Amino acid sequence: MQFLRDAGAVRRTVAAWSAAGDSVALVPTMGNLHAGHIALVEAARRRVARVVVSIFVNPTQFGPREDFAAYPRTLPADRRLLGAAGADLLFAPGVKALYPHDTHRAVTVSVPGLSGELCGASRPGHFDGVCSVVLRLLNVVRPEVALFGEKDFQQLAILRRLVADLQVPVAMACVATVREPDGLAMSSRNQYLTPAERSVAPLLAETLRDCAKRIAAGRKDYARLERDAVRRLRAGGFRPDYVAVRTANDLARPGPDDRRLRVLAAAWLGRARLIDNVPVSAGSRR
């Protein structure tokens, strides 16, 4: 596996692959890799000839009181995992490689509307930072396909809108959330949990699954279901940001005839802000 930090060198490498007829996928990450990330690499390998993984802890998607400085950075271990998973190139740029005029004067990309809801409401500017860095990475690598996990479902919806509106020539692919045996969605931030908190953490997924079962059985009083889920999480020791039932295609509030839905949540447990979501097909009872 090649290891590069320079954007120009990445462009030249990918251009040579493309000239040889090899298709290319990009898996953007912030490192501290786990089985969820490796599932993205493995899915990419099944689709294309060459897989590029980026590792970049992006400062523009962290708020002033968030965990940018403390975010776990484990590059040597990540390199070993990616090599074993069959990645062809690891791109680990410094800040100047992606923000040559520094982050305070950088061009920012924003997707209006959805970026300010759900996670965007409690993390102002977060998705602007995500969009800005992902567009930069796509412009450097120019892959045929980019892969993202469904755990960050709102991020996936926003990036799909970004790519469609700006006519970026890349296919967006997603991989289902990878979970621990007890149902907790895998996340780099899970390591912030104390042992006691870790034993409680699966309640988040359990609560979302229970809400989804009620919807599948025909419940359509979505606001009440959301309130019930929030109360259950609070009783379990969480500090919920939100629980929301939304349409699967654009995360709008569902109408009575909408069938393909997602139940999404974000909640604090100690130092860890956990997010999760589950799909559901709404039942027919009114």
Image (cartoon, rainbow, N blue to C red):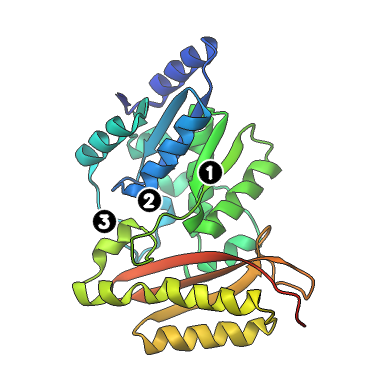
Which residue bears the numbered disc 2? 59
Q: Residue at left 22%, top 45%?
A: 74
Secondary structure under tag 1 reads loop
Residue sitting at x 54%, y 69%: 264
181 versus 41 height, above or below:
below
Dot 3 corresponds to which residue?
69
Mark before the other along the chain sequence, 3 or 2: 2
- Disc 1 versus disc 2: distance between alpha carbons? 14 Å
Label located before the other in sequence (1 or 2): 2
Q: Nearer the viewer, residue 210 or 261?
A: 210
Q: Going from the N terminus, do you reach mark 1 or mark 3 first?
A: 3
Expressed as whole percent of the image width and height from the top left, the position of residue 209 reads 51, 73
Asked which quadrant contains residue 144, the reply is: top right
- Under circle 3, the secondary element is loop
**In the figure, is residue 167 to the left or right of 79?**
right
Is 109 situated left or right of 26 in this image?
right
As drawn, the residue found furthest toward the right would be 257
Residue drawn at (55%, 13%) of the image: 21
Image coordinates of residue 234 in percent, x first then y, are 40, 87
Q: Are dots 1 and 3 in contact, CB under 8 Å?
A: no
Residue type at the position of mark 2: Pro
Residue under numbered circle 1? 107
Q: Visible in this render: residue 100?
A: no
Image quadrant of residue 5? top left
User: What amino acid type should be assigned to the residue bearing mark 1?
Assistant: Val
How busy is the neighbourhood of tag 3: few (under 14 within 10 Å), some, or many (20 plus)? few
Tell which tag, 1 or 3, sits nearer the viewer: 3
Report, in whole angstroms, how far the alpha carbon at label 1 lies from the one at label 3. 23 Å
